[in-house]
Image (cartoon, rainbow, N blue to C red):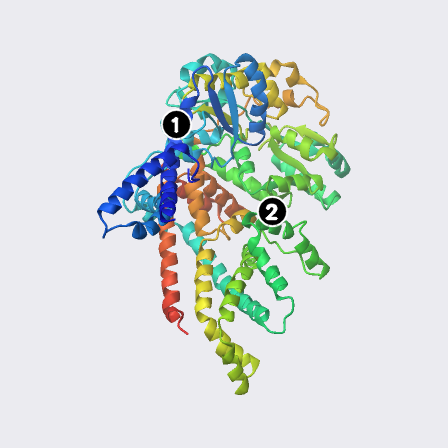
Amino acid sequence: MGHPHLSTGGAEVEATTTVSKKELATTRRKKGWNQKTLAPYLFLSPFFIVFLIFMVYPIIESLYLSFTSTQGTSSEWIGLENFKNILTDGLFWKSLSNVFIILLVQVPLMLILGTLLAVILNSKFLKAKALFRLMIFLPVLIDLVTYSIVFSIIFHEQYGIMNYLLGVLHIDPIQWFSDPFWSKVLIIIAVTWRWTGYNTIILLAGLSAVDDSLYESAEVDGASKFTQFFKITIPMLKPILLFCGILSTIGTIQLFTEPSLLTNGGPNNATNTPVMYLYQFGFQSFQFGYASAAAYIITIIVGIISFFQIKLSKGGEI
Amino acid sequence: MKKFSLLLSLLLVTSVLLVACSGKDEKSGATESGATIKVAAWNSAADALTEQIEGFNKKYPDIKVEILHSDTGYSKVTPALAAGSGAPDIIQTQARDFQAFLTKFPDQFVDLTDKTKAYHDQFIESSWGAVTQDGKVYAMPWDIGPTALYYRIDLFEKAGIDIASIKTWDDYIEAGKKLKEAIPETTMTGYTNDFNLYEIFLNQLGGSYVKDGKINVNSPESKKALLLQKKMKDEGVAINVKDGNGRITANNNETIATNILPVWYAGTLQHSVDKQAGKWGIAPLPAFEEGGNTQANLGGSVLAVSKQSKHTEAAFKFIEYVLTTDEGQQVMIDYGLFPSYVPFYENETFKENNNYFGMEVYPFFAGLTENIHTMDHGPIMLDATKPINDLIGAVLEGKNVDESMETAAKAISKTTKLEVNK
């Protein structure tokens, strides 16, 4: 399913006959739907059909599932019990607090880094810009699973190069995987490495839209580079920063691959995340109803946070 | 041009619809004589089954067999079971998970009671429990995992430890301290981030996850099992090696000197720790108290036939061939899959001397199957995995054992709707 084969013989025949019928129909109703007005919808229709089947239907179906006790093939309507059970489950709140701790440290850190890198890349004095841009963007091109595995090797407690280098600096080896604090730090380092480049490129695009004349007149008025950065660059980037902030927030709340592969949510759930929680119920114990309810709760939380982010920053107005 | 674009878009729409609808016809192609059966299994089990096809086709040239490589998380099988279509004909599950499958996917497995009746006495008695529900058999027991103590003969000698003197787990811990003193960079054993060690201890003690249909992870046996693992960690005789790969590294680097694991680990040592050939010995597990039980089981799988299968007869013939014939079990044993099928224990291949260990490994393990306690996993294991792992994590971290057991029992009760034993 999902891979249209244009060369299907039957499809062609059927298509041509429908076309001739359609043609007849359109000539009859000259003022209504003619080819010109219909064509864009037809062009869009493959997407919408796929979208309906693979997005809208699952969204509605999972809403229904969230009110049932569905596990495997057995199912029963149980009202709000799933929601009640999730909201009273300490593990769910633990996983939520984990991502919020990661979020509060990681997203600001990444956006500051991203902004600084973007400003440097945008500077007139930098040579070989394309090369640096490529280097900063490269981590984004690396598959999530691959980099997680590489990080787990680099940060291996006994044989990893990171603890070896720390040893060279006479720092005791850090328990990246078995200490609740350091395992969170590990996740933050990994996610920051992977996503800073992505945000840098978006911010860079935002910077190139800032009118040079603003800086020129600031220069004439005798404003220092720092003043220019804080009074021109940052305010002009605000909508872009908001955009990056919301995307990163949503991404962090939905964190899955890194904690799943690096720490498997451990030690003792210190890096468990809501999506791992959901996954565990959905695909390890096949409690589809319970997992659907968890998905809706996470979505609502993401929605609320995004709403406040937009409110607080006044929709990114400059 | 306009016509062309209209045509193109219509084509796209119809082809998408056609493809979307065409899923149903796929299966009708195979007829009775030329049946194709699909088998979902994982890792070395799947490899073993793949090797079986040749021998099977000599007997049944008309039945084509396809092996689908699945994973231990069942992520490729369960969507098909839940959807009611697209499931393979034969499905491998862990023995301990099968009851949960029967509960979560009722009416998805073929009743094999009559077909398996003739084999009842030929399999290890305790292996039928996992595949039976309300007196009906829904799967065939495949392999079992009698457990032993793998130890480094050379390191024990160096530290002056006599394996024969280790009768109880307390002796084992004392020996571990002695080892640490003699060879500081080596620890007695390692544990992984799962509940393997806990389950071995629990089974050895005769405990169970479910008793009389009620959740039993808060039992006295469970507490004893948890406290032993904690004691091993606290006394510095057991370190965390994270997972199976970490354990292999630890063995290769001589970070650990013993492994408390089932028969299948003999194969792993031979393949992945091949440089240490001749240095490993195998002994029965230490007991909890002198003269106590030294046998336990960990792991083992079953093969079930899906109700979605159009060729249940052919599917069962395949299961019959691979599990109840000497030819079939001969292939299995090459992959370290220890049979629950007892007649094979008399086979010459089974009795062969193993060069790596310098002993007859399989007959030794066969001797460790006689007193294995039947263990009731109940239908909870798919739901219980996470709570049990959390329970062990909490206890090892120093949390109160009784409270942690209650938390785990409640968490399992919430999703399985089973009561907790008081």
Spot occupied by residue A141 in the image (x, y as percentages of width and height):
56, 53
In the image, residue B316 above or below residue B407? above
Residue that appears at 63% across and 74% down:
A125
Q: Secondary structure at mark 1?
A: helix
Query: Which residue has dot 2 on it?
Result: B234
Q: Residues within 10 Å of mark 1 (few under 14, many from 20)?
A: few
User: Would you say A80 lies left or right of B214 here?
Assistant: left
Residue at point 68%, 60% (across, down):
A171
Q: Quadrant of residue B379?
A: top left
What's the CA distance linking mark 1 and mark 2?
61 Å
Viewer-side residue, A265 vs B417: A265
Q: Is residue A267 visible?
A: no
Image quadrant assignment for residue B306: top left
A275 relative to B359, above or below: below
Q: Quadrant of the C terminus of chain A?
A: bottom left
Kindly state the secondary structure of the residue where label 2 is placed: helix
Q: What amino acid is at disc 2?
A: Asp
> Which of disc 2 and disc 1 is earlier in sequence?
1
On the image, numbered disc 1 is attached to which residue? B25
Chain ID, mark 1 = B
Residue depicted at 71% across the width and 27% down the height: B357
At horizontal 65% and vertical 66% (from top left) the residue drawn is: A128
Q: Residues within 10 Å of mark 2 (few under 14, many from 20)?
A: some
